Amino acid sequence: MSVPSPRTPADVLKRISELELETDGHVANQHILSKPVLKGFAAPGGKGKGWQLYSFDLRYPNNVLKPKGLSACGSIKDYVQFASASAEQLWGLTETKLPAALDAVKNGRLFDTQEHVDTIRDCIALHYARSIAAHEMHYRVFVKVLVVQKNDLLSHPDFLAWLYYKRHGLYPAGIQAYEHIVDELFAPSVERAGKGQFLRTSVERFFKSARTRLSSFGLEIAVAKEGEFLIGDTPVLTMRKGYTSIGPLEGIPLGDADYIIMPLGRRHAVGVAKTNGYREVTQQDVEYNNLLQVRAARRRLYFNRKHSVIP
């Protein structure tokens, strides 16, 4: 499934046309946190219950916490509304390799196999591109660009008057008529956005560009001597020296980050580094990273037991 990432508006529309031919059924329950990653924060739930973990909803902090199965965690209904089957197939190219790579992380043998190293890099790229933050950023950018382009068109009344007359056989009677013709021009784009078509191509593009950007860096595996990492629904933390902001929604996209960190399990996290290696971290380091996960999360946090950083 090697598909060039759309770069221009024409490329995006071409890719949407290709995806419109998709005949596979829609996948409704879509994980933004991969099950193999979530399993690293879970524990056996007893006879017949499988692996379970706690899910803390930031919107309802007073809810009683009860353990849940992996299928009930880390997913959003219809995260990708359009061409979801091929998106799941794309994510699956990484997710099917994750169990072996994560086992290698836990066993201290990640760097023995280049494929495992590449898989963990792709895991970071995937969870950055498929996060709630990326979803929100896409729509923020779309709305911002839409407003700018509409205002730009409204600053050319002569052109709009000509276009209005050509379409309706009348000259525009006032600002509402000008706004109406501008809305007509952008209606197809708004409809595509509403159907999730632009988001689908954006998530694909974010993933592939993140993979390319990360491919030249090493990985540092943090091993907790004490304490346990937790994971949020925006697990890849992107930060810069001298800034308190975290992630693209606060102005630190992947390409501008000095620090890129993601928890991989209760005892392990991965950071992008100049060289490959393992490093032990203290409980204070673990708790600090957990606080950053809490800050970056949009809705939910996941962990094995009730955690000291949870309000």
Image (cartoon, helix red, strand yellow):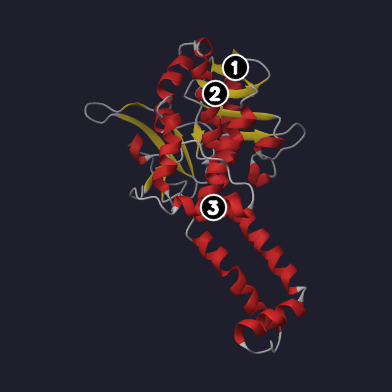
Q: Residue at x 51, y 31 (%)?
A: 308
Q: Which residue is mark 2?
A: 269
Would residue 305 be visible to someone looking at this image? no
For mark 1, what is the residue?
A: 281
Q: Earlier in the sequence, mark 1 or mark 3?
A: 3
Q: Is residue 204 above or below residue 35?
A: below
Element type at mark 1: strand
Q: Which residue type does callout 2 highlight?
A: Ala
| Pick the front one: 302 or 3 | 3
Query: x, y (%) of residue 155?
Result: 77, 73
Query: Which of the labelled discs sits on residue 14, or is there none?
Result: 3
Query: Which element is circle 3 on?
Result: helix
Residue 29 % position (x, y): 36, 46
Amino acid type indicated by mark 1 = Val
Query: Which percent across, then down, holds residue 293?
Result: 56, 35
Quadrant housing residue 250: top right
The image quadrant of residue 255 is top right
Q: Which mark is residue 79?
A: none
Q: Residue at x 44, y 29 (%)?
A: 37
**Pick the front one: 55 or 157:** 157
Q: Residue furthest left?
A: 48
